[in-house]
Amino acid sequence: MKKVFLNTLFLMLSIISFAQTSDISISVSDAETDGPLLGATVYFEELEKGAVTDFDGIATFTEIPNGNQTVKISYVGFKTIETTIEVGTKKEFSFKLESGGNELDEVVIQSSRSTRWGGFYSSNRTTYATKYRENRFGNWPLFCHG
């Protein structure tokens, strides 16, 4: 009788502990067009869990602890949202991002040309390359002729 009671108790505790997490999905869309945002970042800082939205603007998570969880949603060119959701009460959450958040003012591209080529100065590369070969291999063209 004691074994049956302990087995039943263990089974009940397993079921209760398993039910303390939920699988959820978070939908992210544009507030103006109501279209899904592909590649938006959804991140739970406290849990160190994150995901990127798919083609339909949905990020899915498994085994998120029930209760209040802080989620951060961001996308380039849109304002970042940081809010608290109550996991366990529902399985699907939806957020709309407003434009104007992470925009760049300008991009400056600069280039410079190196005056060195392969360890030798480019203006004298033939001279230095020839001297290098002569010092290392002697007069190497003589070896090429049989």
Image (cartoon, rainbow, N blue to C red):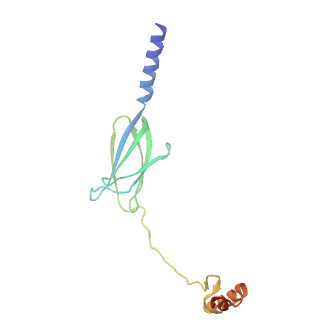
Quadrant housing residue 98: bottom left
State the image coordinates of residue 62 (x, y, percent, origin top left): 40, 40
- Depth check: give the residue in front, 101 or 47: 47
Q: Which residue lies furthest to the front in this view?
A: 146
Compared to 79, does 89 lie above or below? Answer: above
Quarter occupied by the C terminus: bottom right
Horizontally, residue 129 falls left or right of residue 27, namely right
Q: In this view, does 65 lie above or below 39?
A: above
User: What is the count of numbered marks?
Assistant: 0
Residue 43 in view of the camera: no
Residue shown at the point (36%, 41%) measured from the top left = 24
Where 47 falls versus 123 (above or below)?
Answer: above
Nearest the eye: 77 or 47: 47
The x and y percentages for residue 21 are 42, 34
User: Quick check: can you spot residue 134?
Assistant: yes
Image position, residue 113 (x, y; %): 56, 84
Task: Pinpoint residue 76: horizontal percent, then vertical percent.
Answer: 41, 61
Which of 4 and 17 lies nearest the eye of the viewer?
4
Left or right: residue 120 versus residue 48 is: right
Q: Which residue is drawn at 46% across and 74% down?
A: 107
